[in-house]
Amino acid sequence: MLRIAVQSKGRLHDDTMSLLREADIKISETKRTLLVRARNFPVETLFLRDDDIPATVADGVADAGVVGLNELEEKGADVEIVRHLGFGACRLSLALPKDEPYDGPAWFEGKTIATSYPAILRRWLTAQGITATIHVISGSVEISTGVGLADAIFDIVSSGSTLVTNNLREVETVMQSDAVLIANKTISDEKRAVLDEMLFRFDAIRNAETKKYILLNAPQDKVHEITALLPGVKSPTVMPLAETGWCSVHTVIDEERFWEIIGKLKAAGAQGILVMDIEKIII
Ligand code: PRT
Ligand code: ZN
């Protein structure tokens, strides 16, 4: 049985639970207990505050966990980062009142900075050779400058709208973060095998996320031209249609190249183009 620490509520909870669900690991969330065992897979989830997840995994109370890289860096726990999961993307940045002139990191010399991430901030200041006072607060960091508690803030930024609302301007990005799957460094072979099976499923889901399955009809004499436009997983499948002179082409393309490729396919004579989401890809 592999025990995974998951945020009990908050920004990473839902994405973590949907990843487990898509991997067909069925965890019932109806009873809000601390420890819930999956119905069909040797995994149990331990619901915790995100602050406690790195230490819980490092101590071996949980074998694995999902936590923001920012939280892991702050806590400095000795664990293995097994995968970046892609969701919960954000950055840790320094921000100043928006009209304050800024000409580089030296601005922070002698200033007071409010944050919930003192360890990461301390490392950055040291690397820049700057001495500043760090004022640690656990929430509502963004109001610190407005109420005269600090000259600047160091906080999580995602869309940037919280900064704008509080008349702040982002001046330095110190780190990028996303949710990571972490594991205890000394888990048994048996638990490692469960973790590997889970990773295999997570990877199949992530591989599919950025891809589309496309099907189209192509005139026989244009098939070479059309398939040349399709950088598929391997090579496209080409099948004859009942109507002579036509065939059906199936392949997988990267979502980011989708519009570019579709335009070229149409121009080359492709018709009846169908585009579908893919649930999983096993490479
Ligand atoms: O209760 P618990 O301790 O478990 O939760 P928490 O309140 O400490 O954390 P939570 O749920 O807020 O965030 C968990 C993790 O989500 C963080 O550690 C990050 O890794 C990640 N994450 C991603 C974010 C954001 N995006 C985010 N936007 N965490 C917080 N924010 C906050 C930020 O603090 C700021 O107040 O959102 C605001 C900024 O957002 P924008 O979009 O206005 O820029
Ligand atoms: Zn927290």
Image (cartoon, rainbow, N blue to C red):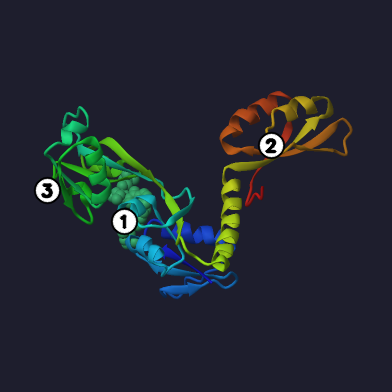
Q: Nearer the viewer, mark 2 or mark 1?
A: 1
Label 3 or label 2, whichever comes before in sequence order: 3
Mark 3: secondary structure = loop
* In the rendered image, the vertical position of residue 31 relative to residue 169, given as above or below: below
**x, y percentage for residue 48?**
37, 67
Residue 75 is marked as 1
Badge 3 crowding class, 10 Å Cα cut-off, few under 14, some 14 to 19, many 20 or more, is some
**x, y percentage for residue 41?**
59, 69
Going by the numbered disc 2, the residue's amino acid type is Gly
* Label 3 close to label 2 by CB (< 8 Å): no
Look at mark 2 in the image and give the residue it sits on. 232
Q: Residue at x 38, y 50 (%)?
A: 69
Residue 208 is marked as none
* In the rendered image, the vertical position of residue 218 relative to residue 203, given as above or below: above
Look at mark 3 in the image and give the residue it sits on. 149
Q: Residue at x 60, y 60 (%)?
A: 197
**CA distance separating discs 3 and 2:** 56 Å
Asked if disc 3 is less than 8 Å from ligand 1, the answer is: no
Q: In the displayed structure, does residue 233 sit left or right of residue 81? A: right
